[in-house]
Image (spheres, rainbow, N blue to C red):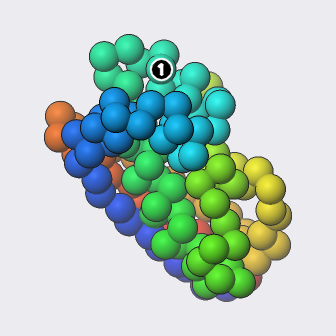
Amino acid sequence: MRVSTGTDIIEIERIQESIDSLGEKFLEKIYTKKEIQYCESKNKMKYQHYAGRFAGKEAIFKAITKVLEDKYSITWQDVEIINDINGRPNVVFLKQNYEQILDIDISISHCKSYAVANVVVILK
């Protein structure tokens, strides 16, 4: 059994600028429909939540690189971060079952300017 981690931080303003300039094209490339619905439900705080999920996906990619054939074998749309009924984010792999991954945990936080995510993966 091995432990693998990934961390990412991003400026919320960068995500807001991408959404404002590229709109649906950016959203549909990075986020699933459920993620978009969740973030849009946050109204004025939506950019913080979009940034948190962006950082989360980056952290996931970093944590699971050891189980990927190559870094292009997974896309933004292959990973979904959805909160459970208690508001805790959970990672779902939509198109691939990674048998080497025994467990995955994610933590996302944000403030006015930054969003950060940390992922811990337990591997066989």
- Quadrant where the N terminus sits is bottom right
* Residue at 17% over, 40% down: 113
User: What is the x, y in percent for residue 109?
Assistant: 33, 43
For mark 1, give the secondary structure.
Answer: helix
User: Which image quadrant is residue 44 in?
Assistant: top left
Residue displayed at 44% across by 69% down: 6
- Density class for disc 1 (Cα within 10 Å; few <14, some 14-19, many ≥20) is some
Q: Amino acid at mark 1?
A: Glu
Left or right of residue 38, residue 46 in this image: left
Measured as percent of width and height from the top left, residue 24 is found at: 52, 31
Up-down relation of residue 99 to residue 67 (above or below): above
Residue to which mark 1 is pinned: 40
Where does residue 21 sit, x and y in percent of width and height? 34, 34
Q: Residue furthest left?
A: 113
Residue 123 visible in image: no
The quarter holding residue 61 reads bottom right
Where 109 sits versus 37, above or below? below
Q: Residue at x 69, y 54 (%)?
A: 78
Query: Which image quarter holds the C terminus?
Result: bottom right
Reply above or below: 39 against 44: below
